[in-house]
């Protein structure tokens, strides 16, 4: 008997079939991964299991051997199904305790909330699974990893036996990811059944027992993780063979083109975020910045691009001092950027593709004349760019919102590269992208490097930094704490652990 | 198209709500709507009154819609309207040029001051982070009392009244005002009954200015790089900032334009209709009606024009049921309120609209 069995589950939105006769069997007490690219239909499927969506007629759901219909999330929770959404559903100004008991508060005989009972119950759970939480802390003040634990505790407090985790590591730091793995193993040990939705292969290898691959809304295959390689998983997911390792020729660094010297800047709370940070970048190389989230990466990117005021220090591109210039002037000095959050900062989501492609350049020749937009030139440019960067669907009139994450990122790449920059700052350029799109972005960055451009790569994915970079600077607490040479990257036997140690605060 | 259908559905439902209210107060809705229809369209002079009534609504609606397109909620139309009419009344009184200079000059000054007034809210948002909804509401009252103060200043105040002096005749934008009263005018008009009827009310150039404004704002938003950047700021301030657009400056500019449009509404009202301004006990509501117009017109320039005419008609014709049926004219207010309510709950009509769209697409 399976803990959960789905037979021929379909779900259509208008003409679009998000799920097409999906079958899935999850055993009791296993960690079952659902692997698929963005838009493959993983989240839709999970929302059906949790009762947020109703499947189309014809499908069946069996839970602990019994056929059931799940009309709403409340019913799912009652049956012991818990879900942790990718974007947490927490009341941010409330304490951890309040968030956990919200909606199922234990009552005293007077009908008021029995806080002492709630607290002892929550603490007992926290200790049982080694969660290490302080129930009085406010959500806003705790880390993302801790927030995730609160979400998991929430499901446990509601007696969940089957826990669905949607992209659980998407916003965690490397350290938090390790803690997360530990928690999942704990849960498995006590007999909980866990479904993890993901497109990260090493995560599956790390914690999952079995894995069901979904592509374009259909079940492709369910495999045993132990006997399947990452390459196999990847090609099943994408539907063609993929190369997980970045192929690149040795770098050929030229003159110094970008120099940052003793940069100081404050963060949004007016505390020092960058402390005498210096770095140098040569033509034809990729300099990776490794570091744990929150060590000044965002502030660095904003300071370099003119979006954040600099307290002191200098930034030079081609020997031109740009630290006092406006963002527009800096952009025109041939510094381009792929921002961290493409949906909020990289694109105007309700602008058309063709409009997003010229966001900074609408005033320039040939896109406008005397302040009037020349639509024909815009269209022509969009056609060329969509062809060159393979942006799909090939429809320049669509709003950016209607494109997949990978294609949205291609719009940004096209826009930034087409301005022919000397330096490109790429901040988390592959965040949330699927394997195929990641491959594409990496390929484009290396191509740009080989054209003699300089690339500053900031990423919280250490693997990505190591794979792409010719040199690596480690950022800790707003300053470069150590530098890793090309030689070391190539030859060090445990390069990942080596850098990880510096990221955690160790010095040379 | 979908938005247009949506607005139509909301309007129809609003009329239905009005019918129910009328029925409940013991008045036949059919009778009432018939009187309203006749009262709006049966005589040329009614058309003229509707046009006069609609002019300020179109402009204030346009003001709200424009600000909305750039991500700002301009509730300050009322205050900007007052600053516009105050400027028109004041400069129209103290300046004495011939109409060819006087009219553009007074219009220009009115737009200038009201755009400064609107821009003030934009500036406060950009510089100090004061939300424009809060600041514009405050500014509405400041404008009201400021205007009342100016009206009472000696030299501008008309003795023994609650009003200001009339504007200089050369400031008037009423069509053929002198000729209408002259002997030749009277005799010519008496031979052309339709035009005679139409010309009775003070039909003025305000409507032309309003329609030109609609066109200009449409061009600005649709065709220019300036509009492109304003819209980018409105849709995603963060992305605009990252694209090197000066978001704060754009917000101020946008509020200036919105303020200017509302001010123009006030100026046309003084220069074309009232010819002076009075002490106000409270807001007249032209500005607030602009919010309704903008919402019904789904916050686009053309929509404001159509909705402006619609609301103008409704307001004008609504008075008629009071005298004819002794029906409370507040019904009109309730109807407008109901329409806005339905517009604010778009989910209500999602399914019928989607089905309607399907049927239309098949054809």
Image: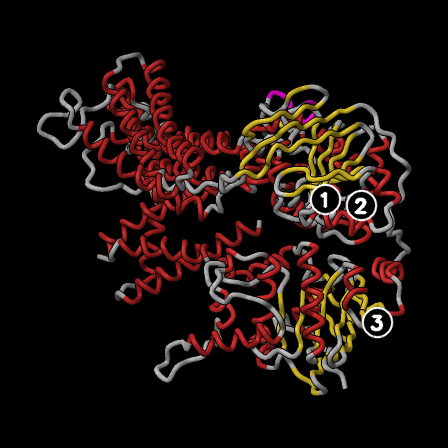
What residue do we see at 31% from left, 26% from top? B174
Label 3: which secondary element: strand
Protein chain holding label 3? A
Q: Are marks 1 and 2 in contact (CB under 8 Å)?
A: yes
The label on residue A222 is: 3
Q: Is residue B47 visible?
A: no
Q: How much space separates mark 3 and mark 2, taking CA atoms? A: 31 Å
Of residues B108 and A64, the one nearer the viewer is A64
x%, y% of residue B222?
58, 34
Of residues A21 and B58, the one nearer the viewer is A21
Location of mark 2 (residue):
A466
What residue do we see at 58% from left, 33% from top? A307
Q: How much space separates mark 1 and mark 3, taking CA atoms? A: 35 Å
Q: Is residue A109 shown above or below B313?
A: below
Of the image marks 1 and 3, the number of the one nearer the N terminus: 3
Direction top: furthest residue:
B97
Protein chain holding label 1? A
x%, y% of residue A396?
72, 41
What residue do we see at 61% from left, 63% from top? A148
The label on residue A290 is: 1
Q: Mostly what secondary structure, the magenta segment? A: loop
Magenta stretch?
A: A365-370
What residue do we see at 67% from left, 67% from top? A165
x%, y% of residue A184?
69, 70
Of the image marks 1 and 2, the number of the one nearer the N terminus: 1
Direction front: furthest residue:
A508
Q: How many marks?
A: 3
């Amino acid at each position: 008997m399976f803990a959960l069995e789905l037979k021929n589950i379909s779900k259509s939105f208008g003409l679009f079939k998000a799920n097409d006769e999906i079958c899935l069997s999850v055993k009791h007490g296993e960690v079952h991964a659902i692997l698929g690219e963005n838009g493959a239909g993983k989240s839709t499927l999970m929302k059906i299991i949790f009762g947020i969506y109703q499947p189309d007629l014809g499908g069946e759901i069996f839970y602990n051997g019994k056929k059931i219909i799940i009309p709403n999330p409340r019913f799912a929770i009652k049956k012991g199904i818990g879900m942790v959404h990718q974007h947490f559903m927490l009341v941010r100004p409330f304490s951890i305790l309040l968030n956990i008991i919200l909606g199922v508060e234990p009552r005293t005989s007077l009908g008021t909330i029995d806080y002492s009972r709630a607290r002892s119950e929550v603490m007992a759970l926290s200790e049982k699974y080694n969660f290490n939480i302080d129930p009085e802390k406010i959500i806003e003040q705790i880390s993302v990893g801790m927030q995730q634990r609160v979400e998991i505790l929430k499901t446990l407090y509601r007696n969940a036996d089957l826990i669905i985790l949607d992209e659980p590591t998407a916003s965690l730091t490397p350290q938090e990811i390790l803690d997360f793995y530990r928690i999942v193993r704990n849960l498995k040990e006590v007999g909980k059944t866990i479904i993890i939705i993901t497109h990260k292969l090493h995560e599956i290898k790390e914690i999952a027992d079995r894995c069901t691959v979904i592509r374009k809304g259909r079940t492709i295959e369910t495999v045993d993780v132990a006997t399947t390689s990452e390459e196999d998983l990847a090609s099943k997911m994408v539907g063609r063979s993929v190369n997980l390792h970045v192929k690149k020729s040795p770098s050929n660094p030229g003159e110094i083109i970008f120099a940052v010297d003793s940069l100081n800047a404050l963060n949004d709370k007016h505390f020092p975020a960058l402390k005498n940070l210096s770095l140098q970048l040569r033509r034809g190389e990729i300099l990776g910045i490794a570091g744990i989230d929150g060590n000044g990466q965002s502030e660095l990117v904003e300071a370099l691009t003119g979006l954040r005021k600099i307290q002191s220090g200098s930034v030079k591109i081609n020997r031109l001092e740009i630290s006092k210039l406006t963002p527009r002037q800096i952009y025109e000095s041939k510094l381009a950027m792929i921002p961290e959050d493409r949906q909020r900062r990289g694109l105007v989501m309700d602008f058309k593709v063709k409009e997003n492609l010229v966001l900074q350049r609408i005033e320039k020749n040939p896109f406008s004349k005397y302040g009037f937009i020349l639509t024909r030139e815009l269209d022509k440019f969009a056609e060329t760019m969509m062809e060159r960067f393979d942006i799909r669907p090939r429809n320049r009139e669509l709003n950016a919102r209607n494109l997949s994450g990978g294609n949205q990122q291609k719009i940004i790449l096209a826009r930034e590269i087409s301005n022919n920059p000397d330096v490109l700052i790429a901040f988390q350029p592959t965040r949330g992208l699927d394997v195929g799109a990641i491959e594409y972005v990496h390929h484009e960055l290396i191509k740009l490097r080989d054209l003699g451009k300089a690339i500053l790569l900031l990423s919280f994915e250490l693997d990505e930094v190591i794979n792409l970079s010719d040199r690596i600077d480690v950022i800790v607490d707003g300053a470069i704490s150590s530098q890793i040479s090309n030689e070391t990257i190539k030859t060090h036997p445990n390069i990942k652990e080596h850098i990880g140690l510096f990221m955690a605060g160790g010095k040379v | 198209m979908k938005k247009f259908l949506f607005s139509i559905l909301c309007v129809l439902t609003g009329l239905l709500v009005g019918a129910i209210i009328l029925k409940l107060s013991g008045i036949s809705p059919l009778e009432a709507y018939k009187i309203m229809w006749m009262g709006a369209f049966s005589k040329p002079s009614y058309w003229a009154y509707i046009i006069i009534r609609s002019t300020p609504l179109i402009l204030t609606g346009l003001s709200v819609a424009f600000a909305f397109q750039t991500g700002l909620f301009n509730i300050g139309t009322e205050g900007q309207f007052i600053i516009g009419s105050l400027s028109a009344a004041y400069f129209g009184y103290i300046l004495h040029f011939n109409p060819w200079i006087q009219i553009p000059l007074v219009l220009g000054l009115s737009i200038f001051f009201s755009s400064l007034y609107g821009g003030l809210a934009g500036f406060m948002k950009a510089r100090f982070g004061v939300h424009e909804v809060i600041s514009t509401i405050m500014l509405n009252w400041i404008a009201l009392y400021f205007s009342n103060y100016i009206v009472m200043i000696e030299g501008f105040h008309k003795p023994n009244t609650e009003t200001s002096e009339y504007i200089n005749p050369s400031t008037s934008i009423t069509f053929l005002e002198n000729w209408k009263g002259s002997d030749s005018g009277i005799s010519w008009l008496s031979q052309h009954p339709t035009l005679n009827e139409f010309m009775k009310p003070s039909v003025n150039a305000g409507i032309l200015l309003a329609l030109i404004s609609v066109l200009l704002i449409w061009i600005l938003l649709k065709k220019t790089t300036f509009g492109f950047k304003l819209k980018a700021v409105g849709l995603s301030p963060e992305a605009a900032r990252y694209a090197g657009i000066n978001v704060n400056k754009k917000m101020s500019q946008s509020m200036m334009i919105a303020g200017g449009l509302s001010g123009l509404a006030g100026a046309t009202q003084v220069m074309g209709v009232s010819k002076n301004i009075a002490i106000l006990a409270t807001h007249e509501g032209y500005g607030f009606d602009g919010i309704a117009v903008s919402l019904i017109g789904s916050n686009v320039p053309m929509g404001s024009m159509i909705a402006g005419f619609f609301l103008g008609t409704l307001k004008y014709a609504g008075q008629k049921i009071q005298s004819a049926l002794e029906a409370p004219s507040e019904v009109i207010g309730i109807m407008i309120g109901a329409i806005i309510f339905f517009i604010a709950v778009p989910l209500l009509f999602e399914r019928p609209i989607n089905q309607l769209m399907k049927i239309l697409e098949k054809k």
